[in-house]
Image: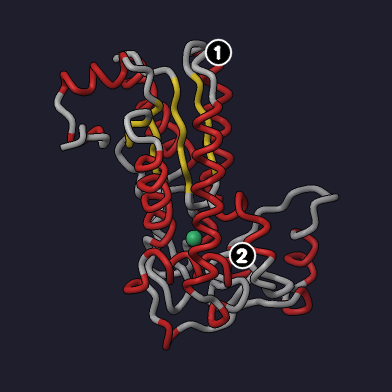
Amino acid sequence: MSAPYRLAEMTTHEAADAAARGTVVVVPAGALEQHGPGMALGTDLVRAEAVVGRVAERLAGRVVVGPSVPVGVSPHHMVFPGTITLTTTTFAAVVREYVTSLHRHGWTRFLVVTGHGGNNAALTTVAQDLLVSHPGVQLAWSPLTSLAGDAVAALDPSPVHGHSGEAETAQMLHLAPHLVHTDRLEPGTTTPDQLDDVSRAARHHAQPTLTLPYDRLSANGVLGDPRRATAEDGAAIVTAIVDRITAFLEEWPAA
Ligand SMILES: [Zn+2]
């Protein structure tokens, strides 16, 4: 039987051995937020955990899968029922305290794989602070879908696409089809002319950044047309993501 690679399934002696071997701790992070009328609230965590599980299988013995962070930074989705948000400071504190706890036991490299873009800014903040407070720690984080730009482009998604759209729905059809209600999928905002002037302007990069609640972007919380997603497209996207995260981990120097 192979050795456990999930921290929660290890004994304290096995954890000590894993840290001494220089393993990387990989932590899935998600969100509990609306994903339109046809997909589950836990979509981002499902995708992050699935990707991390596949990466861990490929890198057997070289990574330890840490406990997930199941709820993330989702204030922009709070108008939609079921959504839970942590403040940025709470989310950052959870990640920082996972990392600093495990650093005391000898681990130095950590990768948070987040299925939710709303966590990105807080993860960067934690990594910046650790440079000063814990110079012996390396904290990396990775998004999912944006690692697979080529595979997403191959879907020929709507001019406006993203949250709960073609690419995200395709991943779920591949990974967890029981959480996709295909009969309830509805298109959301698919073209820039469906956005109001402020929302449209906020999508451009060459100007100040404006953070808006999601109902300003899409009445049903969806960007793109999830009805066009297929499990085959999802498999291509997930494979590209797993390939890129695995390559990063294989090349990551220990110090
Ligand atoms: Zn999502």
Q: Which residue is mark 1?
A: 132
Local crowd size for mark 2, using a 10 Å CA cut-off: few (<14), some (14–19), many (≥20): many
First-in-chain label (2 vs 1) = 1
Spatial CA distance of label 2 from label 1 is 35 Å
Residue at horizontal 49 percent and vertical 16 percent from the top: 254
Residue at horizontal 51 percent and vertical 76 percent from the top: 230
List the single residue furthest toward the front. 1
List the single residue furthest toward the bottom. 183
Residue at horizontal 58 percent and vertical 24 percent from the top: 128
Q: Nearer the viewer, residue 242 or 196?
A: 242
> What kind of residue is marked 2?
Gly
**Residue 57's quadrant in the figure?**
top left
Image quadrant holding the N terminus, namely top left
**Percent position (x, y) of residue 153?**
69, 65
Residue at horizontal 78 percent and vertical 78 percent from the top: 193
Residue 162, which numbered label? 2
Colouring style: secondary structure
Q: Nearer the viewer, residue 197 or 174?
A: 174
Foreground disc of the pair 2, 1: 2
Q: In the figure, is residue 37 to the left or right of 132?
A: left
Q: In the figure, is residue 31 to the left or right of 60?
A: right
Under circle 1, the secondary element is: helix
